[in-house]
Image: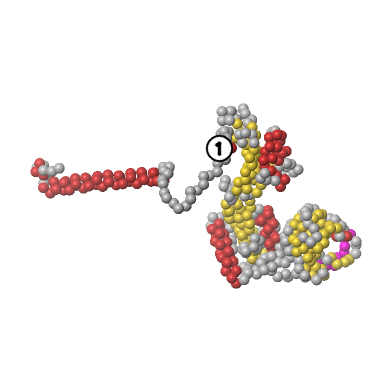
Amino acid sequence: MNIDIAAAPEESPETAAKRLIATKRRRRARRQFLFGFLLTAIFISWMVNDFLAPDVNSVSLSAKPAPSAPEINFDRRDMVPMQRRSSEDQLKKGDSLAALLARNGVAAGEAQAALDSLKTEFDARNLQPGQKVRVFRAWPPEDDAKLSEGQFAGFDLIPEPRQKVIVQRLDDGRFETTRQNRPLNEKYFVADTLITSSVYEAARSSGVAPNLVADLIRLFSFSVDFQRDIREGDQLEVLYTRRFDQNNQLAEEGEIIFVALTNRGQRLAYWLHNQDDEERHYYDEQGRSVQRLLMRTPVDGARLSSRYGMRRHPILGYTRLHRGLDFAAPVGTPIYAAGDGQVIKIGRYGDSGLYIKLRHNDRFETAYAHMNGFAKGLKKGDKVKQGQVIGYVGRTGLATGPHLHYEVLQGNMPVNPRSLNLPPRQELSAQQLAAFETTRTQAAKRIGTLASRNNSLTSLPR
């Protein structure tokens, strides 16, 4: 298109030239815009086709054999779509699954058929009181849920945190039982608190679960006298884990990763560091095992009611050597093996009532008296691990109240359990210390990350 500058006599040649240049620039800009728009449209079309559109089968050659077709469960494939609802119940003391199903309106015949199917995959006799069970009912889509009770469609339960058992009714009336693995997600938590009354209360008020509180008390029981040493203002720090299911519901408590107790200005800190075996081991900052040959206190939450030494017997009335320590606790409180060992005596033993004696090595033995009962199946000759429940607190024999009488014998002679300075069960080698240092660093980083989200924390592992 030609522009005749002379056609505009009112414009000077300079003005007409500038107008021509401006027109050409506008045309160039429009062409660039259209070109950019087309490129953008092509890119968006490619993105939609590659990521959102369904894949189109393409033929490719491979030396590998074709994968086998997935196995099809025809019983489930042919099942008619149904509406479902569930109700949750839990086993009571002395209860059974059959009783629970009957309580939820399941006919005896249907309940038995479902339980027969369950037997092929799971032994319901292992279930404990408090076990939750979901009972399902189903009805056709065209039925009104408000008017229909539906038919029994099965039940499910979670007997272990990482496992789910499902009993499902098929269209022909049969029941099928399947197991499903439940992947759990581990999360870290930190507690940092001052002790005002007891270690137990401080830990629980910070959200630490009771079983983990028992674990940390057991860890410190090798070095701390909880009856005499703990003071108001002492400090407790804990890094621990909990495990959650896919719905972010708590499935199980995890374990203590790090714990520190500042007692009377002295700080005891322990880290979980796994070795080649499957046992959990905790070490101090020098790489020495927290665990000693024997525990100072083989029972949780007990009060030291009588010390080692000469005393006037509360029943016999005369003075004689009290050969051990007495721990007052309610009847039925679990008693733990003070160390790895072997049962060399178990049964009723004169004034000691129900009694257990363990041999730990060629130097040390421990004895436990006035028990209410023994751990199920425990017998003479059995080997036990440190912290394993061997019996329960009672008042059998010559006893004024429920308590544990605990003795330590060295070379067959009684010694004061509180005066023993036993070496660590193990120490890390120089090579193992390098890996342990990594464990400590990782724990400190986790606590630092968690502490940055919670300004109420007052201290970090040092």
Apparent side of residue 17 relative to residue 257 in the rendered image (left or right): left
Residue at image position (57%, 40%) is 73
Q: Which residues are magenta?
A: 307-315
Toward the viewer: 18 or 140? 140
Estimate the x, y position of residue 147 in percent, counting from the top left: 62, 27
Would you say residue 449 sits in the magenta stretch?
no
Mark 1 lies on a secondary structure that is helix
Residue at image position (82%, 54%) is 372
Q: Amino acid at mark 1?
A: Arg
Estimate the x, y position of residue 32 in percent, counting from the top left: 26, 47
What colouring method underlies this structural image?
secondary structure
Residue 342 sits above or below residue 84 on the image: below
Toward the viewer: 97 or 452? 97
Disc 1 target residue: 77
How many numbered tags mark residues here?
1
Residue at image position (78%, 57%) is 378
Q: Quadrant of the N terminus?
A: top left
Q: Residue lying furthest right in this view?
A: 317
Estimate the x, y position of residue 142 in percent, counting from the top left: 56, 28
Q: Quadrant of the C terminus?
A: bottom right
Within the image, what quadrant is residue 352 found in?
bottom right
Estimate the x, y position of residue 50 in percent, counting from the top left: 40, 46
Apparent side of residue 314 relative to residue 451 in the rendered image (left or right): right
Q: Is residue 298 visible?
A: no
Residue 186 sits above or below residue 442 on the image: above
Toward the viewer: 83 or 209? 83
Q: Is residue 94 visible?
A: yes
Q: Answer few, some or many: residues within 10 Å of disc 1's Cα (few below 14, many 20 plus, some between 14 and 19).
A: few
Residue at image position (74%, 41%) is 95
Would you say residue 312 sits in the magenta stretch?
yes
